[in-house]
Image (tube, grey):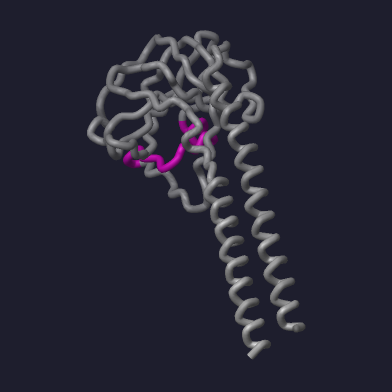
Amino acid sequence: MKRLLFLLIFGVTGTGILLALGTWQVQRLAWKQGVLADIESRIADAPVDLPAKPDPDRDRYLPVQTSGNIGTDELHVLVSVKRVGAGYRIIAPFITTDGRTILLDRGFVPDTDKAGERATGATEVVGNLHWPQEVDSFTPEPDQSNNIWFARDVPKMAAALGTEPFLLIAKSKTDPNVAPLPVDTAGIPNDHLQYAITWFSLALIWAAMTGFFLRRGRAKDKG
């Protein structure tokens, strides 16, 4: 009898914990969906003037519109685009009409166009401010000799091109052969539904196994 009581308590406790974890992930899913909806709404807002001192918390994804000149220097960030393949993000200095120099993410070119010439000079850019967090302890150092970067390391790129430490990611075309890769929420992880399904599935399995062992224990006691 004591063994059956232990199995019952153990089973109910374990099932309850797993159900609580699943419920927590459902709540996290609702929270994350709200966050993503806010970000998407912010991305799609009407563009404003470039802030005097962009802040990574306040101004992340802020839509801006500015005019100036695209510099001739470039940094090339290795990326892959679905249904296209490997290529590079083109990062260039952009000198605004009021004399500021900022980082401009012009967009994507295929690997074969890495060394191609691109339009520079006066233009107007519409895009979003961003501080992408793509660097970790496993990110290789840039291959300076071949101008290949493996992540958008904003501080290092700003130092290399002598710009302010933030990116303006173009939504508008700055060259016929450069495809803009505007910011969106696709790269923001939202795995809470999968986690919830996992926890609820484990709870079901735990409850079923508890029932199985209880039935077997009762059968042994009767035998």
Tell me the quarter of the picture where residue 204 sits.
bottom right
Closer to the camera in the image, 64 or 112: 64
Image x and y of residue 170, in percent: 44, 21
Residue at horizontal 62 percent and vertical 38 percent from the top: 30
Q: Residue furthest bottom?
A: 223
Residue 153 falls inside the magenta stretch: yes
Instruction: Please identify the residue farthest to the left as the structure is shown.
Output: 112
Q: Is residue 211 above or below residue 116?
A: below
| Residue 93 vertical placement versus 75 (above, below) | above
Q: Is residue 102 magenta?
A: no
Q: Which residues are magenta?
A: 145-160
Residue nearest the observer in this picture, 67 or 74: 67
Nearest the eye: 134 or 63: 63
What residue is rendered at 60% in x and 81% in y?
A: 216
- Up the image or down, 81 lies above or below 107; here it is below
Rendered-image quadrant of the N terminus: bottom right
Please identify the residue farthest to the front as the structure is shown. 222
Viewer can see residue 171: yes
Residue 167 is situated, as x and y percent measured from the top left of the image, at 51, 27
Quadrant where the image shows the C terminus? bottom right
| Residue 160, horizontal then vertical, whole percent | 47, 33
